[in-house]
Image (cartoon, rainbow, N blue to C red):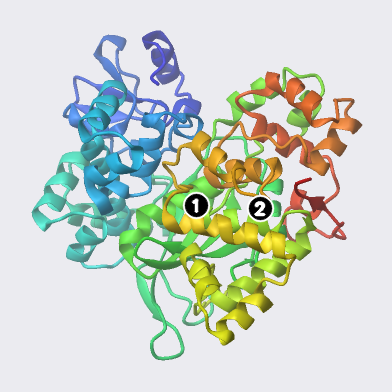
């Protein structure tokens, strides 16, 4: 939540970027709100009011500063840590649930009444779910207006607005500019940059693409695959800001080392992946840069822009507060040298939590290479084919519903195909199908608003799913920063080398001091080993065998 007033004033006076996204400064004399690091002259303390969200400032009648663009800051790290109703609601709103299902859908996912959700959010954040979703729609509209050549009417509906009138009124109210003026100012800024002149440009404004081969597409351009019926893509590039510092080695190394062939790849300095979004498929390419991650997005439906950006941010843990995490872990003498050597380690998560749960079961008690092979067979058998204009991606990971339907199909052809795709012990196959049934039925929620404790309990109740799988899913699919895998062989080996206890029980007891950041401690422990998951892709080291999994 918002720090005390004195701390907020100090942060604003020193233009401390560490607080960007954690609170917003509203200036009563100008009726604008800013990020704490805004370069404008510091207002007098008596003229400042502080809000926990941009939506709360907008609701109070303030407009966004045109200079510091406060809506482009990293998200508050609090929503990644909290497992209560407010934290779950904020993650769901960020994933676009209110736009797709309305407040009733949000309340149903949370298991609360609409009135209770409204009361919780208003009490803590100063804004209800509709105001919070409205702020997100405004930001999406700005991205599309400034970064694509789409007609503004298409921008309005792609951003989630129900009418052009609401679109125009909201953009005018939030930015004090019409949508057309936003587009014109962005183009003028691009021209100035092209002539070497400095301009203030928000961190997530779509940039002109790097040169690509013919047909690769430019921002806002529609690209059609080579054959009739292929997906029509709309392409744009955005910058995803993060809080410094960031050590990208294990983040991208883990994603690429465990990549499913045909679904993920490393190409031209970027992690690329297909992803199933609410309105259609997408392809994302994520490349680490100084101060931001460049995200090149190909979307079959522009209504998925906000969801795609949210998925990318969560997959790379970009809303984390690395200074808070590092400070907590560095109090342990065994971890302190690791933290000092690699500040800002993040937890590699996933673009598709439901697919990751299935992949975690496939990876039990086998090597990384074998897990990739199992997943690739499943993808080729049941995944949706996709045309990738820029690389070698071929499929979207199949949904759990399709796996369940194939398992229940009585035809011999389907049975043989599924048996070939799931060439593994019968017990593990049954475990995989049991998890798939839970996901397909909706009983197991692994999405942005999932109840972490409930999901853990449901997974643990499945025969064949042990503690390693439960905590791995909690860490990478649910995004719990306190997930811990004390039984993992890599963690135990690193603990022994550092003089820490190696038995799961004793290591768990020692790890109590690392709460609520034990998932980050795991990343530091894993990184002590010489394995490709710990290296930026493209570095010249021979991969080593790596076993991970349950004793179950």
Marks 1 and 2, how far apart at CA: 12 Å
Q: Quadrant of residue 50?
A: top left
In the figure, 551 relative to 245: above or below? Answer: below
Quarter placement of the N terminus: top left
Give the structural element (helix, strand or loop) at label 2. Answer: helix
Is any part of residue 81 visible from this angle? yes
Instruction: Tell me where residue 424 appears, x and y as whole percent.
Output: 73, 67
Dot placed on the residue nearer the N-terminal end, 1 or 2: 2
Specify the label residue 312 is tagged with. Answer: 1
| Element carrying mark 1 | helix
Q: Residue at x 21, y 60 (%)?
A: 157
Q: Nearer the viewer, residue 201 or 480?
A: 480
- Residue 467 drawn above or below residue 186: above
Name which residue lies at 56% across and 52% down.
Answer: 350
Question: What residue would you read off at disc 2?
Answer: 252
Residue drawn at x 63%, y 43% is 470
- As drawn, is 102 to the left or to the right of 466? left
Of all residues, the one furthest to the bottom in this rendering is 228
Structural crowding at the residue carrying mark 2, measured as other residues with C-alpha within 10 Å and reported as few (<14), some (14–19) or many (≥20) = many
Quadrant of the rendered structure where residue 100 is? bottom left
Label annotation for residue 101:
none
Seen in the picture, residue 546 relative to 461 is either above or below; the reply is below
Residues 73 and 345: in front is 345
Residue 319 appears anywhere in the view: no
Residue beneath the point at 47% across and 51% down: 311
Foreground: 265 or 193? 265
Dividing the picture into quadrants, the one containing residue 20 is: top left
Q: Position of residue 122 (x, y in %)?
A: 25, 25
Q: For this rendering, which residue is in front, 2 or 260?
A: 260
Give x and y (percent) for residue 313.
Answer: 49, 47
């Amino acid at each position: 939540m918002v720090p005390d007033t004195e701390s907020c004033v100090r942060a604003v006076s020193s233009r401390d970027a560490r607080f960007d996204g954690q609170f917003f400064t509203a200036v009563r004399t100008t009726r604008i709100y800013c990020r704490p690091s805004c370069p404008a002259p510091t207002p007098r303390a008596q003229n400042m009011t502080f809000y926990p969200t941009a939506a709360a400032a907008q609701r109070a009648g303030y407009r966004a500063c045109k200079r510091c663009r406060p809506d482009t800051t990293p998200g508050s790290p609090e929503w990644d840590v909290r497992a209560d109703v407010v934290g779950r609601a904020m993650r769901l709103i960020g994933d676009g649930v209110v736009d797709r299902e309305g407040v009733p859908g949000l309340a149903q996912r949370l298991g609360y009444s609409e009135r209770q959700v409204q009361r919780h959010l208003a009490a803590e954040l100063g804004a209800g779910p509709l105001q919070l979703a409205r702020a997100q729609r405004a930001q999406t509209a700005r991205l599309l207006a400034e970064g694509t050549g789409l007609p503004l009417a298409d921008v309005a509906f792609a951003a989630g607005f129900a009418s052009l009138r609401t679109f125009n009124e909201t953009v005018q109210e939030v930015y004090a500019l019409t949508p057309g003026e936003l587009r014109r100012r962005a183009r003028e800024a691009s021209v100035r940059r092209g002539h070497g002149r400095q301009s203030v440009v928000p961190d997530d404004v779509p940039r002109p693409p790097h040169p690509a081969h013919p047909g690769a597409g430019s921002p806002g351009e529609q690209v059609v695959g080579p054959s009739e019926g292929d997906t029509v893509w709309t392409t744009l590039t955005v910058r995803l800001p993060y809080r410094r510092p960031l050590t990208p080695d294990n983040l991208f190394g883990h994603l690429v080392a465990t990549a499913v062939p045909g679904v993920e790849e490393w190409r031209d300095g970027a992690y690329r992946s297909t992803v199933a979004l609410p309105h259609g498929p997408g392809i994302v390419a994520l490349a680490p840069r100084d101060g931001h991650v460049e995200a090149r997005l190909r979307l079959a439906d522009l209504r998925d822009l906000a969801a795609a950006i949210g998925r990318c941010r969560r997959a790379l843990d970009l809303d984390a507060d690395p200074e808070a995490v590092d400070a907590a872990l560095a109090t342990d003498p065994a971890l302190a040298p690791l933290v000092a050597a690699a500040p800002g380690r993040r937890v590699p998560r996933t673009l598709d939590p439901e697919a990751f749960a299935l992949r975690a079961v496939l990876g039990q008690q086998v090597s990384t290479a074998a897990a990739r092979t199992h997943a690739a067979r499943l993808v080729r058998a049941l995944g949706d084919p996709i045309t990738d204009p820029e690389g070698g991606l071929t499929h979207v990971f199949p949904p759990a519903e399709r796996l369940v339907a194939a398992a229940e199909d009585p035809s011999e052809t389907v049975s043989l195909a599924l048996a070939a795709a799931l060439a593994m012990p019968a017990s593990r196959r049954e475990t995989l199908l049991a998890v798939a049934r839970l996901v397909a039925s909706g009983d197991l929620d692994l999405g942005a608003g999932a109840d972490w404790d409930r999901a853990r309990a449901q997974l643990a109740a499945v025969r064949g799913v042990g503690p390693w799988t439960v905590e791995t899913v909690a860490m990478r699919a649910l995004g719990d920063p306190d997930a811990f895998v004390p039984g993992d062989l890599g963690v135990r080996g690193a603990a022994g080398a550092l003089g820490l206890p190696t038995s799961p029980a004793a290591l768990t007891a020692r790890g109590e001091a690392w709460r609520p950041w034990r998932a980050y401690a795991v990343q530091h422990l894993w990184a002590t080993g010489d394995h490709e998951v710990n290296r930026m892709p493209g570095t010249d080291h021979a991969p080593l065998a790596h076993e991970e999994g349950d004793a179950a």
